[in-house]
Amino acid sequence: MMYIRASIFFLGVLATLFLGWAGLTMIPGLQIREIKPASALKPYKDQQLRGRAIYIREGCIYCHSQQTRPEGFGADQKRGWGRPSVPGDYVYDKPHLLGTMRTGPDLFNIAARQPSEDWHLIHLYDPRATSPGSIMPPYPWLFKEDEVFSKEVYAAKGERVVPVPEEFAPEGKVIIATHEALDLVAYLVSLNHTYSIEQKVNNNE
Amino acid sequence: MNSDQETFNINESPELTSRVLTDASASGPVIAFFTSAVFWLLIGTVFGLIASIKFNFPDWLGSIPALTFGRVRPAHLNAVIYGWASMAIAGCYVWLTARLCRTEVGWPRLLYISVLLWNMGVLYGIISILGGHTQGMEWLEFPRIAVYLITPAAVSLSLSILRTFHARQVKHIYVSLWYVLASVVWFPILYLIANLPFYSGVTQAAANWWYAHNLLTVWVTPAGLAAAYYFIPKVIGRPIHSYYLSLLGFWTFALFYNWNGIHHLVGGPLPTWLISTSIVASVLMFIPVITVAINHHLTMIGHFKKLKYSPTLRFVVFGAMCYTAVSFQGSIEALRSFSEVSHFTHYTIGHAHLGLYAFFTMILFGAIYYIMPRLVKWEWPYPVLIKFHFWFVALGIALYVVSLTIGGILQGFYMNDASQPFIESVNITKPYLLARSIAGVLILIGHLFFIYIFTLMVTRKGAIRLTPPWREEPEAATR
Amino acid sequence: MATLMPLPLAGLILILVALLGGAMAMFAFLWAVRSKQFKDLSSGAYAIFDEEEPVGKMTDNTFGFPESEESTEKRD
C-alpha cells in the first residue's frame, strides 16, 4: 500500500515534467526541424563565427535581442528594424542569441541600419563617442594604442586605425583595432536578415 | 553546553529525543550547505551591485574585461541561483525531510560529497564566465565541466533525501514533503536534459526558456512553498487552514507550472500555438497560487501579533505574501497585450527579483533562522541585528521592485512609440536604474548583518542566550 | 523552401500524449479514492505537531515571549 502510493506519486511527478518537456521542446522541435533555411541566408564565415564567439563572450545578449516582432506588436516594424523574424532565419545559430532584453536596440538587422565598420569600431571603443546618452559599456581591450605615424606605416604594419573623435581618444595616441574587434565587427555587419522570404511561417498573425 | 539538562530531557520524552537525534544527524551536512550558500550570497550580491552600478556609470571598471557588464551579470545570476539558492535549498530539504519523516538523515556522506562537488562546480563556472567562457544561453552559462560537477552533486542530494524518506517513521506524508520529493526527483533530470547538446536555432530558444522557467518550477518555488507550508503553522502552532486545498494546489502546480517557459518568447519567431500554450498555462497558474494563498494567509489570520516574537515568521510571511503578488504579476505579464509593453524591459528584472528575492530568498532566510539554532544548539546572538537584516532587505527589495516596475513600464511605452528615438527609452529609465542601485546597497548592508551573525553562529562565538530546544515559553504566558 | 511539417501530425502526437496523460491521471485519482486516500484529510495538517510541540505553542521566540520576557531569562 505504501509502495503503491509512493510509486503513483513519483510517476505523476515524472509525468508532469516530461509532458511539459515533450510539449514545449520536443514537438515544436519536430515541427521546426523540417524548416529549411531561407535561400538568401548564408552560413557564417569563419571570421563571422569568431566574432559571434566574442559577442557571446562579452555578454552582448544581456542587453540586445536578435528577433524582430510583427506589425501590431511593439514598434519594430514602424522603426524599420526589418520584417518579423521566422524560424528559418536561425537555422545556423548555435547557441541561439534571441535575447530577452532591449536595454539597447535589437541587432537582428543592424547591418542594414548601420553598415559602416568604422562606426561599429568607434562605438565598441567608446559607445558615447557615437551615441550620446548610451549606457553601453566600452570594450577597450578589443583595441590597442599606437604612436602617431603616417598612413603608410600602419598599412605596412597591417594595422587598422579606428577614427575615434579627438575628444574620446587618448592624447597623442592612435587607436588600433585588434583582430578580435575586427572579427566582432565582421559579425555585426553580417547581421542582415532583410531578404524576402517566400513563405510566411505561422507566426503571430 | 548544559549536558546534564540534555540527558534529563532526552530521558523524559521519546518524541523530543527523536527530534533532537534527527536534528543532530542533519547538523553537519546542513551547516555545510548553509555556510556555502551564505558565501555565494555575498559573492552574488556584490556582482549584482556591480552590474547595477554599471548602468549608472557605464565607464566604471570599464577597462577590466572580467568585470564588464556582460560577464558580471551572468556571474551574479549563476552565483545566486546555483550557489546561494541551490545550496540553501539543499540544506533546507535535508533538514525538512529528516524532520517530517521523523528519522535520521540517510547516507550523510553523500551529502558531504554533494556540498564539495556543488561548490567546485559553481566556483569553476563563475571563474569561467568572468574569463569569458560561457555556453551563451541565459541560466545555462556554466560550461560543461561545471555541469558535470553539479549534476552528480544534485543526484547525491536526491539519493540521500530519498533514502531518508524510505526510512520514514511516519504514516502521513505532510504536504511540504510532497514538494521536497517532487523537487529532488525533478531537478537533476531537468538540469541534465537542458544541458544536452541536441538543440539549435529557435528550438534551442524554446528549450532554453523551458529550462529557465522550469528551474523555478522544480527547484526554487517548491523549496519556498515547502518551507512556508512547514514554518508558518509550526511557528505559530496552528495547523494550516485547508489541507485538502494544499494537495489540490500541489498537483495543479505540477501540471501547469511545467508549461510556462515559452511566455519569455512572446512575439518571437516561434509557432503561435507554442507561445499560446505557455500563456494559457501561465494563466492557469492562478489555481495553485490561490490555493497556496488561501492556506498561507488564512492560517495567519488572528496570529499576526506573533510576527513580533519570531524572526522566522517575519521573513516567511513576507515571502509568502510576495509569492501571491509575484504569481499574479507573472500570470498577467504572460498575456500578449501586457507582454507587448513589459517584454524586453527592466520590468521583467523587477518581476524576477520579486520572485527570487522577495519570495524565495526571504523565506529561506526565515528557514535558516529557525534551523540553525537547532543544529548548533545555540541561540542567535544580537537579535537586534536580525531586525536590521529584515528591515534593510525588506525596504531594499521593495524599492528595487517598485523602481524597476515603473521604470520598465515607461521604457516599454517609449520603446513601442516609434516617434521617440530609441535612446529616449534608455534615458527615461536612468533615474529608476539609480534607485535600483540604491536598493542594491540597502540589500547588501542587510546581507552583511546576516552574514555577521551567521558567522558568529557557525563559529559559536558572540553573546550566549538560552539553549534550544529546551528554551520554552513560560507556563503563565502559554495558557 | 521553408515548409512546415504538416501540423496535424505534431498536433496528433500532442493530443495522444494529452489523452494518455489524462487517462493515467484519472486512474491514479480513482485508485486514490478507492483506497481511501482522501479519508481523514485534515489529520494530515497535524502531522507536524507532537506532544512536546503541540498545537497552540509557538516554537520560535528569538525576539522574546508575549507578556513576560523576564521570567524566560530565569529559566535557564
Image (spheres, rainbow, N blue to C red):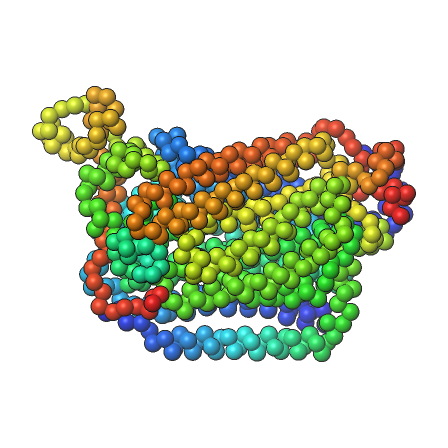
Q: Nearer the viewer, residue B449 or C35?
A: B449
Q: Quadrant of residue A175?
A: top left
Residue at 54% over, 74% down: C21
Residue at 44% over, 49% down: B409
Q: Nearer the viewer, residue A89 or B59?
A: B59
Q: Is residue B35 left or right of residue B274?
A: right
Q: Which quadrant is the N terminus of chain A positioned in?
A: bottom right
Residue at 79% over, 52% down: B237
Please, is residue A1 above or below residue B321 in the view? Answer: below
Please, is residue B53 above or below residue B176 in the view? Answer: above
Numbered-mark total: 0
Q: Is residue B150 left or right of residue A30?
A: right
Residue B177 appears anywhere in the view: no
Residue B116, how many percent across, how many down? 57, 43
Residue A65, how many percent across, how many down? 34, 51
Residue B184, how many percent across, how many down? 60, 57
Residue C60, how many percent across, how many down? 76, 44
Q: Is residue A191 left or right of residue B326?
A: left
Residue sitting at the far front:
B419
Residue A197 appears anywhere in the view: yes
Q: Which quadrant is the C terminus of chain A positioned in?
A: bottom left
Please, is residue A143 above or below residue C5 in the view? Answer: above
Residue at 32% over, 54% down: A75
Q: Nearer the viewer, residue B119 or B271?
A: B271
Residue sitting at the far top:
A172
Residue sitting at the far left:
A152
